Amino acid sequence: MAEKLTIRYWDDPVLSTVCEPVADNEFGLELEDFAASLLLTMDAFHGIGLAAPQVGVAKRVFVMTFPDGYKSDDDPKPIVVINPTLESSGPTIYGREGCLSLPSIFEQVARPQKTVLRYFRPDGTETELELTDLNARVAFHEADHLFGIMFFDRRRVSRQVNRAVERAWGKIKHDYV
């Protein structure tokens, strides 16, 4: 049964954890229930993506919407992504990113414009999608969470941007933790 989960905020050690892959024997009803709870939580916080470590679970699972739509479907359903791999292509472009684990803070982050996202669904079905622009950005952002990387990490932004985000969080952190 799906239930709204608690969001973990920056400085929580789980957000810096490299997550474990979901094992073959973990697919099934329990994983489907967790996925439903992730989707419910993402929706409740008006997110466009949410990764398992953001709710305290160090597993390679995330959910995402398609803010740019997907192919001919004007209202595509959010997807549950398990054990993803992303193959980037196209130019790297800057775009504004934020994070449910660091509310109300946004910054420009460089990401590949295109990707092929390969993943498993909760029932174990292997799937592949070609994503571009904001859809690709969401997939890269959420996949980073599975490797303990936040959007303002030094691997993604300059030292100045990193420090500015950390200062901004220090000023509002007391509102969330």
Image (spheres, rainbow, N blue to C red):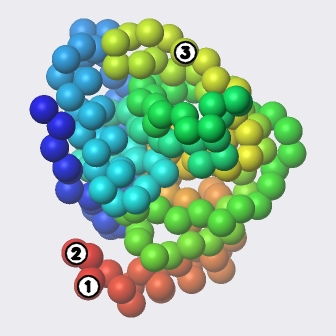
Which disc number belongs to residue 27? none
Q: Secondary structure at mark 3?
A: strand
Whole-angstrom CA distance, mark 1 to mark 2, is 6 Å
**Amino acid found under the numbered disc labelled 3:** Thr
- Which of the two discs, 1 and 3, labels the residue nearer the N terminus? 3
**Amino acid found under the numbered disc labelled 2:** Val
User: Is the C terminus in the top left, top right, bottom left or bottom right quadrant?
Assistant: bottom left
Whole-angstrom CA distance, mark 2 to mark 3, is 37 Å
Q: Is residue 126 visible?
A: yes
Q: How many numbered dots are placed on residues in this image?
A: 3
Rendered residue at 50%/11% (across/down): 126
Left or right: 86, with 148 as reference point: right
- Which of the two discs, 2 and 3, labels the residue nearer the N terminus? 3
Q: Secondary structure at mark 1?
A: helix
Q: Secondary structure at mark 2?
A: loop
- Looking at this view, is 154 or 22 the one in front? 22
* Residue named by callout 2: 177
- Looking at this view, is 43 or 74 the one in front? 74
* Residue named by callout 3: 127
Picture quadrant where residue 95 is located = bottom right
**Residue 2 image offset from top left, x and y in percent:** 18, 37
Q: Is residue 86 visible?
A: no
* Residue named by callout 1: 174
**Residue 96 image offset from top left, x and y in percent:** 66, 66
Left or right: 115, with 43 as reference point: right
Rendered residue at 24%/14% (across/down): 28
